[in-house]
Amino acid sequence: MAEHRVIDARGSFCPGPLMELIAAMKKSAVGDTFELLSTDDGSAKDVPEWVNKVGHAINRTERDAEGVWHIVVQKMK
Amino acid sequence: MRIVVVGGGMGGTIFANNLARRIGSELRSGKAKITMLTASDKHIYQPGWLYVALGRMMPDELEREQASLLEPGIDLHVDPVETFKLDEKRVITKSGKTHEYDLLVIATGSRPVPEEIPGLKETAIHCYSPEDALRFYDTINQFKGGRILVTVGLPHKCPMIPLEVTFTLYDFMKDRGLLDKTEFYYTYPIGRLHSLENVGKWAAVEFERLGVKTETFFNLKEVDRDKGVVRSEEGSEVKFDLLVAVPPHRGQEVIERNGLGANGWIPTDRHTLHMEGPHGENVLVLGDTTNIPISKAGSTAHFEAEVAAENVAALIKIGRPVRTYDGKVFCFIEAGKDRATYAMFTYQKPPEPKMPNGAVHAFKMAYNKLYWASARGLL
């Protein structure tokens, strides 16, 4: 059964939100979803760029009232 | 209060010593007790392995007897924990002894797992143990030219090592007159040359000046040793003559086996450093062992350990903690054999790296010796 995990990368400059996401996805199963929380505006650009390059899927991208990006990614391969 | 520290690396040792210095009278009166359970009678300054890999330090310069570093009153057992019984507030060691605690501090660190990438362990050199650092030196010492590929697995310990190993290898080959026969190719998992944006921008300028070729969005998938190529998750393929890796890491097996955290990383509150979950009130986690989205580096463990020690001392003396961890990290960045810069940052403040210079390198070399004062909780 597919899992859903939240990766709280708020305030992470190093390794940073995308590196946290990549590391987590490597240890997961196809179909699992990940909700990345990021305070880095760059995540809204670089996360989809990597996800599209590898062939995973972006299910949702939104910024909440506190300025935190919520990017939901599904592992597709 | 009975405090049991699991792990005698940087985080556990600095914590225990810092705390012991703060609660000397309580230790002498028996009001508090610090026990350290560790796997080795040696303490190793791991950042020094880079210099061993370059033939500039000897492995024995990086080792001290663990017992010689600890404050009087810390009860050291070279007897690693095998079983955590958090609901009963006790741990059981390899020898079968049980240690009960009021407060448990877990600082077991991380370990390289190159075997998780097919072909990587058999093919690449890295510098994450004394033996591997010596093999690194032997390999580059015999290198006669070709493409040196630096590639990076995730997650990994020491965020600056991909850049440092590239810059220092460049100078190594330059000193040997091999630059005209050597091509440097640097890959990185995300869309820039380093996770820290400012550091990545600086590195891009330096690499262009040195002629280092780069490829971003490159995540290790497999190494084909026979064909001399590395393939990425993103579908790329890069040839190499010498493969230099920053292997992926995991937390310690004992953490996974006891169900304390996936892949050996324990869910930890980023400010209080307490373990998340029902037993967290009695458990602190330090250094690489946490799942906090922050650099797995000695300086992280160091600054966390200071905060934790101050809070535990305050708990003993006034019944409540006094500090929170702000995400402080300080990393030197070697930019060659004789120049360095640094990155200092918190959860709130990104780093602003300066141009490398000889003075920062000299300070780094001095810190390699001063570390033993840090381990003792003095610096």
Image: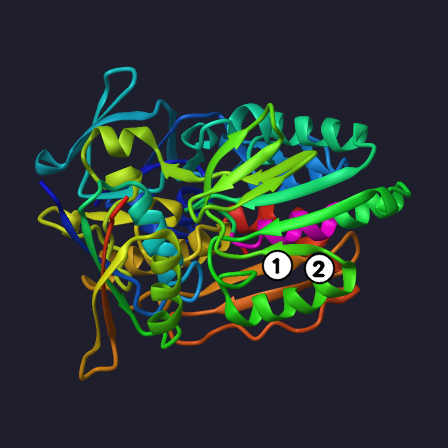
For the residue pair B280 and B244, the one nearer the viewer reads as B244
Say which label, 1 or 2, has the lower sequence index.
1
- Disc assigned to residue B332: 1
**Residue B254 appears anywhere in the view:** yes
Q: Position of residue B23 (x, y in %)?
A: 35, 52
Q: Which of B87 and A24 is in front in this view?
A: A24
Dominant secondary-structure state across the stretch colored magenta: helix
Q: Where is residue B183 in the image (x, y as percent from the top left)?
A: 76, 46
Taking the image as shown, residue B284 lies to the left or right of residue B36, namely: left
**For residue B129, side relative to residue B14 (left or right):** right
Q: Is residue B180 magenta?
A: no
* Image location (x, y in percent) of residue B113: 44, 32
Vertical comparison of B198 with B226: above or below: below
Compared across the picture, whether A65 is left or right of B118 comes to: left
Callout 2: residue from which chain? Answer: B
| Left or right: B330, with B96 as reference point | right
The amino acid type found where label 2 is placed reads Phe
Q: Determine the CA span between mark 1 and mark 2.
A: 9 Å
The quarter in which the N terminus of chain B is drawn is: top left
Rendering quarter of residue B243: top right
Measuring 47% from the left and 31% from the top, which residue is drawn there? B114
Is the residue under label 2 in contact with that under label 1 (CB below 8 Å)? yes
Callout 2: helix, strand or loop? helix
Query: Which residue in the structure is indicated by mark 2?
Result: B363
Residue B316 is labelled as none
Q: Residues within 10 Å of mark 2 (few under 14, many from 20)?
A: some
**Is residue B56 in sight in this rendering?**
no
Magenta-drawn stretch contains B167: yes
Amino acid carrying label 1: it is: Phe
